[in-house]
Image (tube, grey):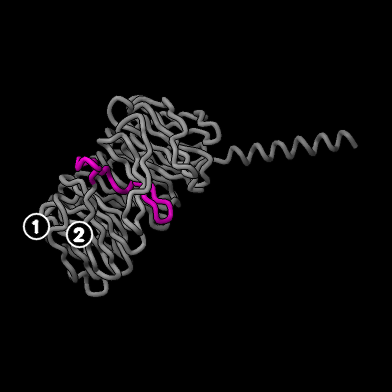
Amino acid sequence: MKNNLLILCVLISASCAGLSRKPLPKTYVVQRERESLYVLDGKEEKLIGSLGNLNHATMKFDGNFGYVLARDGYLSKVDTVTDQLVKKVKIGKSGIGITFIGPYISVVNYDPQSVVLLDKDLNVVKTIETGSRNVGVKVFENYLVFSLMDKNQIWVLDANKDFAVVRQFENVGNLPFDALIKDDKYIVGFFNEAAIGILNLKEMHYEKLVFKDSHDKLIYKVPHFGYWGIINNLAIVPLVAEKKLLVLDLNTTKAVKEINLIGDPVFAAVSPDKKSLIVNYSGEKENFISVVDLTRFEKKQDIDVAKRVMHLRFSPDGKKALVTSYFDNSLKVLDTKNWSVTDVKKVATPSGIFIKGMKE
């Protein structure tokens, strides 16, 4: 009887250990200097090459396919079951953003100054000339929304009306450069102005909020909005020039709190359970990440983890954090219980991390 109980305990322990070592979902890492994606699928590692200039590249998933937009205007369709390149087309000289709307893919370009609509087999359906570099493309219901950097405008297109421009908002701010969407609010940041703009897409009402402290000193500079942390109605905004995170209430558009950091923050990623946030840095603290407790909105610890941290992301279950190290040529996996490095994969000049099945 004792031997049977011992065997049962061993089996249960082994089973639990197996669960704790559950592999990551299929993960794609941009190899910036090699025009390729590194693919981690369980223990299997693959490469997908010939994707174009992957500086600031982005990848979006739709069903069993991933779409990779390269900076030099190539759009590639990848089969995420076989990890084979299905098709690659060139739709411009400088592509900057991609999203899905209904059966279409929308790509915004710097050069040529246009927005291109394609079907999901990468056939061009429509090209919209804007006369400006275009950024911050987002979708709300049947609306396609984006900002025009060189015209200081926001355009709203209606997919139900053959993507006709149904609203144009003028003089929204000085050089819009990125945006996020939260419920019915399109939130845009400006490169040359310490402010954000909020467009309510239900009411088609726009307002701009300028951020200043009590001494009337401009304190705001926004990194790419895709890496703001969002928790319910709160946005966690990296304040680059101030070495802080700003907690911003999107409903009241008021600052709730500031969190002091050790350097200039770049990306802020929120854990799936909304209890933790990790942030990386540019400049002298680029080897560090910091962990922030979101139950108290306080910085918990700083970790010297890698040489130039380029990107970071939580696993879907929140038990792991993934970090790319550009100068270490590695993808590092951390256990979020104790923030120790549990695995290292060799990846050449890695930057962006994209996990299949995980909401962007």
Circle 2 residue: 116
Residue visible at 16% across and 66% down in the picture: 168
Residue 130 at x, y = what percent? 12, 60
| Quarter of the figure with residue 57 | top left
Circle 1 residue: 131
Instruction: Please identify the quadrant where the N terminus is shown.
Output: top right
Residue 288 in sight: yes
Residue 167 — which label?
none
As displayed, is residue 244 above or below residue 129?
above
What's under tag 2, amino acid-wise? Val
Q: How many marks?
A: 2
> 10 Å neighbourhood of mark 2: few (<14), some, or many (≥20)?
many
Residue 127 at x, y = what percent? 16, 62
Residue 86 in sight: no
| Quarter of the figure with residue 220 | top left
- Report the front residue among 198 and 23: 198
Residue 259 at x, y = what percent? 38, 38
Residue 245 at x, y = what percent? 35, 40
Task: Give, as a single range, the part of the protein colored magenta.
Answer: 212-235
- Report the front residue among 91 and 5: 5
What's under tag 1, amino acid-wise? Gly
Residue visible at 48% across and 48% down in the picture: 274
Is 232 magenta? The answer is yes
Looking at the image, the residue that sits furthest to the left is 131
State the separation of the CA atoms marked 2 and 1. Answer: 13 Å
Looking at the image, the residue that sits furthest to the right is 1
Residue visible at 43% across and 27% down in the picture: 303
Is 6 magenta? The answer is no
Residue visible at 47% across and 33% down in the picture: 300
- Report the front residue among 79 and 210: 210
As displayed, is residue 186 above or below residue 84?
below
